Amino acid sequence: MPLTKVLITVKTYPSLSAKYGELVCTAGFLEDGSWIRLYPIPFRKLKKDVKYTKYQWIELDIVNNDKDFRPESFRPVALDTPITLMNTIDTKGNWYKRKQIVLGKVYTDIKALIAEAHDKDICTSLAVFKPTKVTDFKVEKVSAEWDKKKLDE
């Protein structure tokens, strides 16, 4: 696959992997507006000059993540795959440029979105969803302590 340009919009909280140590899942949009998931990314181990931010275009060599059935899932060719940082999309004009990309396809019907997720021909697993009403919001604490041995692997 040729180098792929991705607009980063999501970076998960780091998680520990028995195989790779600390990793993040990163998601964003391709130039055509479709979603993409990039995993695994050893974000904290990346050199400072390739640590991308949200709403920054990056370019890297990727392949389908054959260990993940979801169609949006890709992985870098290798954990040390070079990443080229490109421009960051600003928030001018009430986030106009960001909205042009992110709000291309917005779901408002949760049942339709879940049906797509369960449809084996579609398997939607990343989407922009605008709820009609927010009825609850919970924040739950998790342990901030990590096994130091796994971090040093």
Image (cartoon, helix red, strand yellow):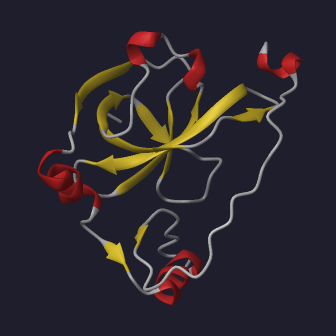
Asked if one can make out residue 75 in the rendered structure from this viewpoint, the answer is yes
Could you say where residue 55 lies in the image, as x and y percent from the top left?
Answer: 31, 40
Residue shown at the point (88%, 25%) measured from the top left: 147
Instruction: Identify whether 124 is placed above or below 14.
Output: below
Could you tell whether 3 is left or right of 100 in the image? right
Residue shown at the point (21%, 45%) measured from the top left: 91
Could you say where residue 37 lies in the image, as x and y percent from the top left?
Answer: 48, 48
Instruction: Identify whether 20 is placed above or below 133.
Output: above
Could you say where residue 4 lies in the image, as x and y percent from the top left?
Answer: 31, 36
Residue shown at the point (39%, 11%) measured from the top left: 49
Could you say where residue 70 lies in the image, as x and y percent from the top left?
Answer: 55, 60
Q: Nearer the viewer, residue 81 or 47?
A: 47
Could you tell whether 19 is left or right of 58 in the image? right
Residue shown at the point (60%, 58%) measured from the top left: 69
Asked if one can make out residue 3 in the rendered structure from this viewpoint, the answer is no
Could you tell whether 48 is left or right of 115 in the image? left
